[in-house]
Image (cartoon, helix red, strand yellow):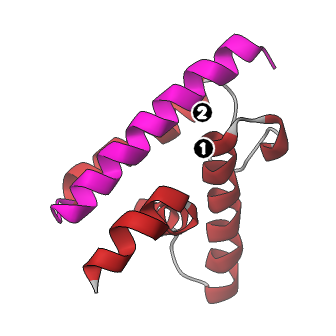
């Protein structure tokens, strides 16, 4: 995979992450889902994931935030199949946010 594409995707994922964190703080879940859907579409466009949200690339070959997002997607899919429920963007997003260090250390403690 081309390093330039990996760098572009990483920047887009980082921006989407911080936008989603801000929207979660504001409790604007509709906009948060829309922002998350945009980043999933970008990942699909660059062949990181399939239309069925299956991860196509090895997450270890990606930069930090993209790797975390792809691993979160895989984890959410494993949980989905074990519970027999529909997999939603919010479920994937919640796994992704919980795995993010910035969110864990700065945002999450302030919500209790």
Most prominent secondary structure in the magenta stretch?
helix
Placement of the C terminus among the 4 image quadrants = bottom left
Q: Which residues are magenta?
A: 1-28
Residue 85: give x, y in percent of width and height.
Answer: 53, 81
Instruction: Tell me which residue sits at (58%, 26%) in the image.
Output: 9
Q: Is residue 83 above or below residue 110?
A: below
Mark sitting on residue 44: 2
**In the figure, is residue 94 to the left or right of 84?**
left
Instruction: Check if mark 2's residue and mark 1's residue have beta carbons within 8 Å.
Output: no
Q: Nearer the viewer, residue 105 or 100?
A: 105
Q: SS class of the residue under badge 1?
A: helix
Q: Is residue 25 magenta?
A: yes
Which residue is at a point 68% across and 68% down the rendered structure image? 75
Q: Residue at x 25, y 52 (%)?
A: 22
| Percent of width and height locating residue 96 | 53, 60
Q: Is residue 66 above or below residue 91?
A: above
How many C-alpha atoms fall within 10 Å of the one at disc 2: few (<14), some, or many (≥20)?
A: some
Q: Residue 111 falls in which quadrant of the image?
A: bottom left
Residue identifier under label 1: 65
In percent of width and height, residue 49 lies at 67, 40
Between disc 2 and disc 1, whose residue precedes? 2
Quick check: can you spot residue 21?
yes
């Amino acid at each position: 995979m081309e390093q330039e594409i990996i760098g572009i995707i990483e920047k887009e994922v980082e921006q989407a992450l911080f936008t989603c964190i801000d929207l979660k703080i504001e409790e604007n879940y509709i906009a948060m889902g829309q922002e998350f859907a945009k980043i999933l579409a970008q990942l699909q466009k660059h062949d990181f994931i399939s239309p069925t949200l299956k991860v196509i690339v090895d997450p270890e070959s990606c930069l930090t935030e993209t790797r975390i997002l792809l691993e979160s997607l895989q984890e959410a899919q494993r949980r989905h199949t074990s519970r027999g429920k529909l997999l939603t963007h919010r479920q994937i997003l919640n796994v992704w946010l919980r795995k993010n260090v910035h969110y864990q250390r700065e945002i999450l403690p302030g919500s209790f």
